[in-house]
Amino acid sequence: MVYCLVLGFVYRALKVSDLPRILLDAARTTAIVMILVAVSTALSFVMSFSHIPGMVSDAMLGLSSNPTVILLVMMAILLVVGCFMDPTPAILIFTPIFLPVVETFGVDPLHFGTMIVYNLCVGVITPPVGNVLFVGARVAGLRIEPVVAKLAWFLLAIVIGLFVVVFVPQISLWLPTALGLAGD
C-alpha cells in the first residue's frame, strides 16, 4: 500500500489533497469487508451450533456415495454461490458445511481449499451477477455486453481448468508436497 502511494506521487497521479478521499474510500471498503467477515463468522457459528453441517453432510451422503457425484454437486453449488456472493463470506460459510463431506471420501483439505477458492473465483466473473466482471468492465470503461461476449471462450477454458483441478488433486498438491508442507 505504501509502495502504491509512493508510486502515485512519483508519477504525479496523486496529490496530497487526494489522500483524505482515498483513505476514506479505503476505510469504507475495509469496513464492508470486515462486516461481511463478521456476519459470516457469526453465521458459521450458528450453523455449527445448530448442527447444520452434519445435516447437510448426511443429506449429501444420502444423495450418493459416489465421490465424483458429490464433488460435482459441490462444484455446482459453489459456482452458483460465487455468482451472487463475495468469496470471503462464502468460504467462511460453506467450508464448515462441505469439509466434513469431502473428508469422508478422503479428499485432502488442501485440495479441497483449492477447489472451493477456484469455484468461487469462477463465480465472481460469471454473469448474471459476476461482480468482478462488472468492476473490470467499468474500470476499462466498457459496456458489459461486449465484455461478456468476449468472455465466453475464456470462461469455458476456466471451467475446464476447474474440472482438471477438482479431479486431479496432484495439481493443487504438488507445490505443498514439494515444499514438505503436505504429506503424500
Image (cartoon, rainbow, N blue to C red):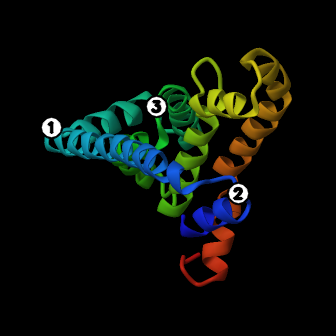
Q: Which residue is mark 3?
A: 85
Q: Quadrant of the N terminus?
A: bottom right
Q: Quadrant of the C terminus?
A: bottom right
Q: Is residue 66 above or below residue 177?
A: above
The percent position of residue 44, horizontal first and vertical second, equals: 25, 43
The residue positioned farthest toward the left in the image shown: 49
Q: Residue 169: name its quadrant.
A: bottom right
Identity, as a three-letter code, of the amino acid under mark 3: Met
The percent position of residue 80, horizontal first and vertical second, equals: 53, 26
Asked whether 7 or 161 is in front, the reply is 7
Asked whether 97 or 16 is in front, the reply is 16
- Rounded to the nearest whole Å, what is the CA distance between mark 1 and mark 2? 55 Å
Whichever of labels 3 and 2 marks the residue nearer the N terminus, that label is 2
Q: Which residue is mark 2?
A: 12
Q: Is residue 96 above or below residue 159?
A: below
Q: Which residue is mark 1?
A: 50
Say few, some or many: other residues with alpha carbon within 10 Å of mark 2 (under 14 / 14 to 19 / 20 or more): few
Does dot 2 land on a helix, a strand or a loop? Answer: loop
- Left or right placement of residue 176 versus residue 63 in this view: right
| Pair 3/1: label in front | 3
| Pair 3/2: label in front | 2
Asked whether 33 or 25 is in front, the reply is 25
- Left or right placement of residue 7 versus residue 78 in this view: right
Say few, some or many: other residues with alpha carbon within 10 Å of mark 1 (under 14 / 14 to 19 / 20 or more): few
Does dot 1 land on a helix, a strand or a loop? Answer: loop
Residue 144 is tagged as: none
Identity, as a three-letter code, of the amino acid under mark 2: Arg
- Rounded to the nearest whole Å, what is the CA distance between mark 3 and mark 2? 36 Å
The percent position of residue 162, horizontal first and vertical second, equals: 69, 43
